[in-house]
Image (cartoon, helix red, strand yellow):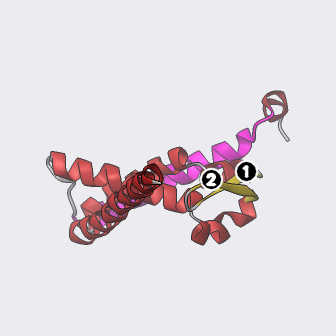
Amino acid sequence: MSEVSKEYGRPLGGYVLIMAAYGGAVAAAAAVAVLRGKQPPDRLGPLDLLLMGVSTHRLSRTLSKDPVTSPLRAPFTRFRGVSGPAELKEEPRDAMGELMACPFCLAQWVATGYAAGLVLAPRLTRLIGATMTAVAVSDWLQLGYAKLMKGAE
């Protein structure tokens, strides 16, 4: 463990590797776009931003909290219980665990992937975004319904 990591009690070396992987992924997506002659959109309209935001929220939570995706997180986290409706509470083992168990941390990766998708495969990306947005809206309706039912008791 480096002196800086010991001093702060944080996996700083792991963070550096994660940042390098992120930079490498962005560079690779940009290289693919250049090689394919793809250009980014001139602008993103309000509906594109809304779709991107809501689908990023939902996919980030699915990856970081959903019980079904827990096998992806298991090598990097420790199970600590349930944190909310259909969500797990997991403790990170290392820097990768912090990334995998944090919807706020994953959101940057998901949004970057969505942006790359808008350049490389816009129709498919919008379909995936619409699907995840529909799931998010359904989640909010399920939670609202449960609250109404609880209030009616």
- Asked if the residue at tag 1 contacts the one at tag 2, i.e. Cβ–Cβ closer than 8 Å, the answer is yes
Viewer-closest of 85 and 96: 85
Identity of the amino acid at label 2? Ala
Q: Which of marks 2 and 1 is nearer the N terminus?
A: 1
Magenta span covers which residues?
Answer: 9-37
Most foreground residue, 33 or 132? 132
**Residue at image point 50% right, 62% down:** 62
The magenta stretch spans residue 15: yes
Chief secondary structure of the magenta portion = helix
- On the image, the x and y values in percent for residue 11 come to 75, 42
Secondary structure category for the residue under label 1 = strand
Residue beneath disc 1? 92
Residue 105 picture location, percent across and down: 54, 46
The crowd level at tag 2 (other Cα within 10 Å; few <14, some 14-19, many 20+) is many
Quarter of the N terminus within the rendering:
top right
Tag 1: amino acid: Pro
